[in-house]
Image (cartoon, grey):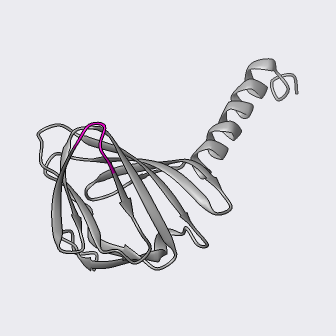
Amino acid sequence: MEKCFSVDRMVDDYIRVYEEILDKYKSKSETSWGHYEVLMERPGYKVKILTVLPQGEISLQRHHHRSEHWYIVKGKGIVTKNRSETRVLTGDSVDLPVNEVHRIKNIDNDNLVFIEVAKGDYLGEDDIVRLEDKYGRE
């Protein structure tokens, strides 16, 4: 009986429960091109940090319900907006209105990291309309 209520056992149980809660609500998601983490989400906007692996790229896509603003934190990339391409470097930013076709590709041997602020009436990941995807997710 004493073993069931020992301080060590209770601490272990609490730690296990906290780890389960953290795993359940973990906001980091692994993808084919790298990973992203939701930093904040409130009604009408979401803030993420995205890391694109060397030579990786997100799918050519658009969103029906949200606009996005990207701020390049680290690395070098090529942003496709509609049919034009622009080189981006650390400190650059990109605005993507609702329904604009876009993609970013890492052109460096280091990770490309950027902050994304999405604003709109719906912010779910299922708002992504993939037009091209080298990872077979079209």
Q: Quadrant of residue 138?
A: bottom left
Does 132 appear in magenta? no
Does 92 appear in magenta? yes
Q: Quadrant of residue 12?
A: top right
Percent position of residue 110, x then y: 17, 37
Front residue of 56/14: it is 56
Front residue of 41/6: it is 41
Q: What residue appears at the point 70 percent right and 40 percent down from the top-left corner?
A: 17
Residue extending furthest right? Answer: 1
Residue numbers of the magenta segment: 89-93
Residue extending furthest top? Answer: 7
Front residue of 63/10: it is 63
Name the image quarter holding the N terminus.
Answer: top right
Judged left or right of residue 121, residue 105 is left
Percent position of residue 88, x then y: 21, 47
Q: How many marks?
A: 0
Judged left or right of residue 136, residue 123 is right
Judged left or right of residue 21, residue 89 is left
- In this rendering, the answer to whether 34 lies above or below 73 is below
Percent position of residue 100, x then y: 35, 74
Q: What residue appears at the point 31 percent right and 37 percent down from the top-left corner?
A: 91
Judged left or right of residue 128, residue 51 is left
Percent position of residue 134, x then y: 17, 70
Q: What residue appears at the point 12 percent right and 42 percent down from the top-left corner?
A: 108
Magenta stretch: dominant SS?
A: loop
